Every structure is written in structure tokens, then in C-alpha cells.
């Protein structure tokens, strides 16, 4: 077997493993939500962060960069806020997430820097 074929097979196995792990995390998340106790709070947070990590790795394995994912999230947030999506109408959840990302993540800082630099000159 050629090295390239081995790499493709390895990638397929990893994608399947990531999908299975994501399903397990989602299942655990649903299970924890039915408990409704404070004991499960850390486990719920662990499921949420684990799912996000798996989705980023899965995106990379499928040929997308983390920046691609970030840019698509930014676009969805802007659209959802502008169109008054139900998540935005119910407690401004999208605006709060957008603000969090602007304050804590570099991908908004780069956009701000580029807009600032080009508008000032």
C-alpha cells in the first residue's frame, strides 16, 4: 500500500472516531441535562467544551482551517443579529457571544486591526 493511501485510510479512521466521540458527548450531554442537579454542572461544561474541540479537529480533518470555522461563525453571528434570529430575540444571546469573541479571541482583533489600518490611510 502506498504512503498516500495509508494517510487517507488513517484520516478516514480518525474522522469516524471523531464523529463517534461527538455522538457520545452529545448523548452524555442529554443525559446530564435530565439530571438537573448542580452536581452535573462541571460535567455539562466538559461536554460543551469537548464538543467544540472535537468539531474544530473534525473540521481540520475535513479540510477546513480553524480560521474557516471562525469566519463562518462570525458571518452567522452578524447575520443572526441583523435578521433578529430567535436566539437574539430571546436574551440577545448572539450579541453576547459576539461581544465575548471580540473581547477574548484574536480573530476579531485581526479584523478590527485591518479595518482600522485601512480606514485610517
Image (cartoon, grey):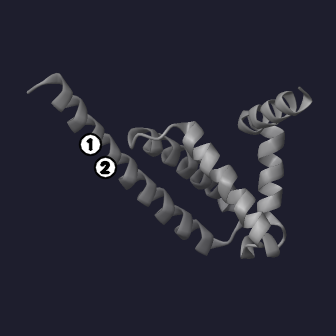
Residue toward you, 2 or 110: 110
> Which quadrant of the view contains residue 94?
bottom right
Q: What number is the disc on residue 13?
A: 1
The residue where tag 2 is placed is 16
Which residue lies at the image location 82% right of the left edge and 30% below the top edge?
118
Q: What number is the disc on residue 49?
A: none
Q: How crowded is mark 2: few (under 14 residues within 10 Å), some or many (20 or more)?
A: few
Q: Is residue 37 left or right of residue 50?
A: right
Q: Is residue 69 left or right of residue 11?
A: right
Callouts 2 and 1 close, C-beta under 8 Å: yes
Which residue lies at the image location 41% right of the left edge and 51% below the top edge?
21
Residue toward you, 120 or 5: 120
Percent x, y of residue 52: 57, 49
Residue farthest to the front? 121
Q: Look at the numbered disc 1 and give the secondary structure of its residue.
A: helix
Percent x, y of residue 22: 45, 54
> Which quadrant of the view contains residue 81?
bottom right
Q: Look at the numbered disc 2 and give the secondary structure of its residue.
A: helix
In the rendered view, tell whether residue 115 sits above or below residue 117.
below
In the rendered view, tell whether residue 57 sits above or below residue 78.
above
Amino acid at each position: 500500500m502506498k504512503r498516500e493511501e495509508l494517510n487517507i485510510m488513517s484520516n478516514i479512521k480518525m474522522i469516524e472516531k471523531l464523529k463517534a466521540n461527538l455522538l457520545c458527548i452529545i448523548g452524555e450531554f442529554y443525559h446530564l441535562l435530565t439530571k438537573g442537579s448542580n452536581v452535573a454542572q462541571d460535567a455539562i461544561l466538559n461536554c460543551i467544551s469537548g464538543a467544540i474541540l472535537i468539531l474544530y479537529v473534525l473540521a481540520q480533518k475535513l479540510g477546513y482551517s480553524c480560521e474557516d470555522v471562525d469566519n463562518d461563525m462570525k458571518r452567522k453571528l452578524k447575520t443572526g443579529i441583523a435578521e433578529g434570529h430567535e436566539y437574539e430575540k430571546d436574551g440577545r444571546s448572539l450579541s453576547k457571544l459576539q461581544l465575548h469573541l471580540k473581547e477574548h479571541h484574536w480573530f476579531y482583533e485581526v479584523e478590527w486591526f485591518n479595518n482600522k489600518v485601512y480606514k485610517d490611510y
